[in-house]
């Protein structure tokens, strides 16, 4: 069984996330998602709209996802790879060449998949708040 591992915040799930998960899953037979905890999001300088439990519940309902584990530090990846016998770490191309991932080539394959353009959680939040502001009399 070829096991794939990816990481992310996965807040306010959108089609960019779904396409990434679909393509990551297609690299093997089993997809694990290291889901950033609320505390780790703070380390990443991100604040998710939904808490970890809610984001995990949503991800576990996605047919491409086989297992969700917490991502609570940058450095846990080699241990995750060993513990779950991961063959490929797959990330969106915005991470291509990043020190956060390149070193993992010592442990397993690292694949970067093209990001879906024109969608991001930040963009959705901004557009919603702008629309709300326009509504106000
Ligand atoms: N993504 C994508 N297309 C988008 C938006 C996101 O392909 N339009 C991908 C990202 O490249 C990433 C995944 O979806 O691989 C999850 O994105 P985020 O939730 O923004 O995750 P990120 O903040 O990049 O966290 O240790 C790594 C980090 O936890 C990654």
Image (spheres, grey):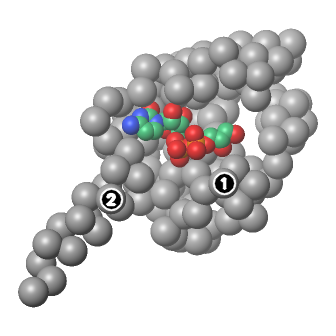
Which image quarter holds the C terminus?
A: bottom left
Q: Position of residue 97 (x, y in %)?
A: 66, 15
The image shows residue 21, relative to residue 29, as above or below, that is: below
Neighbour tally class for label 2: few under 14, some 14-19, many 20 plus, Cα within 10 Å: few
* Quadrant in the picture for residue 119: top left
Specify whether 120 is left or right of 51: left
Q: Position of residue 46 (x, y in %)?
A: 60, 56
Q: Is mark 2 within 8 Å of ligand 1?
A: no
Specify whether 34 is left or right of 107: left
The image shows residue 81, relative to residue 121, as above or below, that is: above
Q: Which residue is label 2 attached to? A: 126
Specify whether 129 is left or right of 34: left
The number of numbered discs placed on residues in the rendered structure image is 2
Q: Nearer the viewer, residue 45 or 56?
A: 45
Q: Nearer the viewer, residue 130 or 98?
A: 130
Describe the element under mark 2 as helix, strand or loop. helix
The image shows residue 12, relative to residue 115, as above or below, that is: below
Q: Is residue 68 visible?
A: no
- The residue shown at (34%, 50%) is 123
Q: Which residue is label 1 attached to? A: 45
């Amino acid at each position: 069984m070829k096991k794939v591992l990816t990481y992310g915040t996965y807040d306010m799930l959108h089609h960019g996330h779904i396409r990434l998960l679909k393509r990551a899953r297609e690299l093997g037979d089993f997809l694990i998602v290291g889901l950033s905890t609320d505390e780790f999001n703070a380390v990443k300088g991100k604040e998710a709209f939904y808490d970890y439990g809610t984001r995990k519940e949503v991800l576990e309902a996605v047919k491409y996802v086989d297992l969700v584990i917490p991502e609570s530090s940058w450095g846990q990846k080699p241990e995750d790879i060993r513990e779950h016998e991961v063959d490929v770490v797959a990330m969106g191309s915005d991470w291509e060449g990043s020190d956060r991932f390149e070193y993992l080539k010592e442990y397993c394959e690292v694949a970067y998949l093209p990001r879906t353009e024109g969608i991001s959680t930040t963009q959705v939040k901004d557009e919603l708040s702008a629309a709300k502001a326009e509504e106000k009399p």
